[in-house]
Structure formats: C-alpha cells, structure tokens
Amino acid sequence: MNDFKPIGSVHSPFKVPVGAPIQPAFAEGAEGTVEVLSQYAEGLRDLEGFERLWLVYWLHKAPPGALSVIPFRDTTARGVFATRAPCRPNAIGISCVRLLAVSGTILTVGDLDILDGTPLLDIKPYVPEFDSFPNAKAGWLDACGVDRTHADERFDPEKTR
Amino acid sequence: MNDFKPIGSVHSPFKVPVGAPIQPAFAEGAEGTVEVLSQYAEGLRDLEGFERLWLVYWLHKAPPGALSVIPFRDTTARGVFATRAPCRPNAIGISCVRLLAVSGTILTVGDLDILDGTPLLDIKPYVPEFDSFPNAKAGWLDACGVDRTHADERFDPEKTR
C-alpha cells in the first residue's frame, strides 16, 4: 500500500465530534480554512472558479472501524459500507465543501462538516458532470424517518458506544 | 497517520491506463466487479437499494505525484488539486459507479473507470442529498475545449511523460 501523508490540515469551528454537522449539506454557514503545506502550493493553481471542492481526509477522531453501525439518520443497525458513518475499516472521509476564497496556501471554505485539526489527504474539484446524480436512489436513506443533521455521541471515541 | 489497508480489489476490463474511461460519466456500458475480503462481508449489508456507490481506492498505477499537470480535458498545465488527474501527492481516487448487483462479497458495478487489480479502500453509498450539486461552477472545466473521454498515454507510468 502506498504511504499516504497529510498535505495540510483543516481548521474548523467543530472541536469535538458531538454537535458537528454530519454532512456539508447540513453545515450551511459553517466556515473554516484549509491550510495546505507550503511544498504543495503549486498544486493549488486554478482552484479559483470552482464553486465546490472534495476534501479527502483522515477521520482521525473516529472510533475503531466497525462493520455494523446505527447511523445518525436511522434507528437500525446497517452495514457500515451502506452508511457514511466515520468508524470505517479505513477511516477516510470525503466532504464536498464550498470554496469561498483562495489566499496563498489558505483556502476559506463553507458548508464545512470536518473536525478541527483533521489531516488532509487530497483536494479534488467538484465537477457536476462527474459527480452529480440528482436522481440516484439512496436505499434505506430514502426511507429513513430520522432527520438528524448534527452528531450526537454515538461515534465519539471518548464515550462508550 | 492511520495505517490504511485494502478491503478488497476491483476486477475491470481495463488492464492498462491507456484507453480507460477517465471518469465513470464516460464509462457507460463498462462493467466489472468489486471483490470485498470475506472479513468485511458484514459491512456490505443494506447496500442493495443504492443506485450508485462511491468507491475509494489507491491509484496504484499512477505515476509519482506531480503538482502541475496537463489534464485529459485541457491543453494547459493546471494545479493538480484543480484536476482529477491520477498523479496526486496522495494517490487516492474516488469513482461514483453504478451498483448493479450484490452477491455475497461480490458487487457487480457499471460505469466503471477503474483499472483491473486496483486495491479498494472504502465503499460509501452515493446520496444525492449529500453529493449532488448539479449547478456548481466548475472553473476551467466549464470552459475547456477538449472533450476527451478516454485516457491517452500521458499518465501511463510506463511511458515518458
């Protein structure tokens, strides 16, 4: 396996898992910054003009990986790969944030659902032609009756699960 | 940094980079399978009903990371983080494939743009409410004049770049 290493980190108003938005879609108004290490500055050219970015990151505050979880928007245990829960065998998260400004190696981003101090692995532009499938069926999530938008304690490693 | 390890691998008609679709959006009709290691079988429960999945994987055939690249759909060098090119500082790819069938630990998938033998890191359900932003502006890609849909030799590690 390749040796992945942080290219930067995320600065966010969310210092602990509890209370953080569970997805960018529920993080309207939440802003923060992405600080990219200076040696990667050249790679940030041409980001301006993209409205949204995928941030790929290490879910460094996630509990150990589990295969069955009760996700935030359900009351039933589901296979973890059918959820976006953080406690995955490989703790890799993806978030489609809003790009507000680029200043050197600092990106100001909105719709931010990522915890403060999160190690960043990659940045990719969001491209609707590649990434947007508005009518895709979404299994149990289409039928779920829980409209939770912010995290409770269930995936907080400092609490008993 | 967490120790990421494959949870399975991708079986695909695309054995080499040249000629492979550059995105799932250009891979209509391309089918393959995702073989998940048996110890993760429990995590696949409830995948049925999702029309599309995010596959997160190691771009194991990518050339070493570069910070400026001429992407497939342009003739100008761009910052790599403003492209979906495979030669990234952390060679992590994401592809939104179509889920066709689940049989035990084998997922049959369509719209597949991933190379044969690719090590799989994660599977996440595609959820339009979380992932679909059809009107997001896409920077240089909105203005690009190149409509290439399949890879040429530029990111083939066996060719001179």
Image (cartoon, coloured by chain):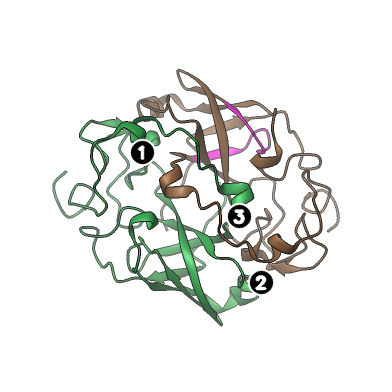
Chain colours: A green, B brown
Q: Residue at x 26, y 41 (%)?
A: A73
- From the top left corner, tell me how far across and down residue A130 is, in percent: 62, 48
User: Mark 2 or mark 3, which is nearer to you?
Assistant: 3
* Residues shaded magenta: B109-121
Res. A83 mark = 1
| Few, some or many residues within 10 Å of mark 1 (<14, 14–19, 20+) | many
In the foreground, B44 or B101:
B101
On the same chain, marks 2 and 3? The answer is yes
Q: Is residue B151 above or below residue A97?
A: above
In the foreground, A37 or B99:
B99
Q: Residue at x 57, y 36 (%)?
A: B97
* Cβ atoms under marks 2 and 3 closer than 8 Å: no
Q: Is residue B120 above or below residue A7?
A: above
On the same chain, marks 1 and 2? The answer is yes
Kind of residue at disc 2: Asp
Kind of residue at disc 1: Thr
- From the top left corner, tell me how far across and down residue A48 is, in percent: 61, 73
Chain under numbered label 3:
A
Q: Residue at x 28, y 67 (%)?
A: A14
Q: CA distance from mark 2 to mark 3?
A: 14 Å
Q: Secondary structure at mark 2?
A: loop
Q: CA distance from mark 1 to mark 2?
A: 33 Å
Residue lying furthest bottom in this view? A104
In the foreground, B1 or B59:
B59
Kind of residue at disc 3: Val
Residue A53 seen by the camera: yes
Q: CA distance from mark 1 to mark 3?
A: 23 Å
- From the top left corner, tell me how far across and down residue B132 is, in percent: 49, 48
Give the labeled residue for mark 3.
A127
Q: Earlier in the sequence, mark 1 or mark 2?
A: 2
Res. A46 mark = 2
